[in-house]
Image (cartoon, rainbow, N blue to C red):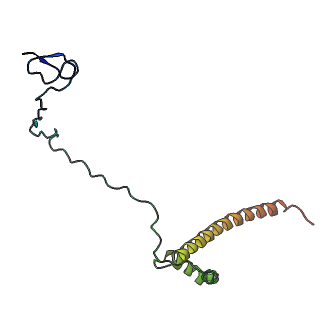
Amino acid sequence: MAQYCRSCGSTLEEGAQFCRVCGAAQEGYSAPTPQPVSTPYQAPYAAPYAQPAPIPQPAPSYYAAPAQQGAAPLGVGDYIIMMIVSGIPFVGFIMLLVWAFGSQTNPNKKNWARAILILMLIGIVLSIILSSTLIAVFREVFESMEGYSY
């Protein structure tokens, strides 16, 4: 007995589950459940005695350490006392070193002391350059005036 499509009316083959013309599913058809495919596990090829891949390490951080927690800002009086103490010839230099490189020093005081030490170093270098230049200039002037008499 010939079967006809319920959707478009075209003739169907014997036992057809779908119409070839319109693709409509026919009565009594249920989609087959796919069977799981079981394939044995095959490990990827590895050369004999291969070294394991290195575990990536986080990149090192070159940023400054965070400021100490609870470090209170310095007041005007603290800065005045630091300037007076650092103005004492020998004691001031020692205190600048203690403040600049001490571990328990307030970060504001530490940065101020480091800045003063850097400025002192720049001043010493510039004074050496300037004095050596002036000595050379004065020596040249006095040597060129040897033949003159007043």
Q: Compared with residue 57, is residue 32 higher up or lower down, i.e. above or below?
A: above
In terms of depth relative to the viewer, which is nearer, 68 or 1? 1
109 lies left or right of 58: right
Residue nearer the viewer, 93 or 114: 114
Q: Quadrant of the C terminus?
A: bottom right
* Quadrant location of the N terminus in the rendered image: top left
Residue positioned most to the right? 150
User: Is residue 22 placed above or below 42 in the rendered structure?
Assistant: above
Q: Position of residue 24 (x, y in %)?
A: 20, 25
Q: Residue at x 89, y 62 (%)?
A: 148
Total numbered badges shown on the rendered structure: 0
**Vertically, is 13 above or below 26?**
above
Residue 38 in picture, x, y percent from top left: 9, 37
At x 58%, y 72%, the residue is 117
Q: Nearer the viewer, residue 45 or 131?
A: 45
Check the image and name the residue furthest to the left: 1
Dividing the picture into quadrants, the one containing residue 132 is bottom right
Q: Is residue 121 left or right of residue 49?
A: right
Q: Quadrant of residue 45?
A: top left
Q: Is residue 65 left or right of residue 24?
A: right
| Of 55 and 33, the residue lying toward us | 33
In percent of width and height, residue 3 lies at 11, 18
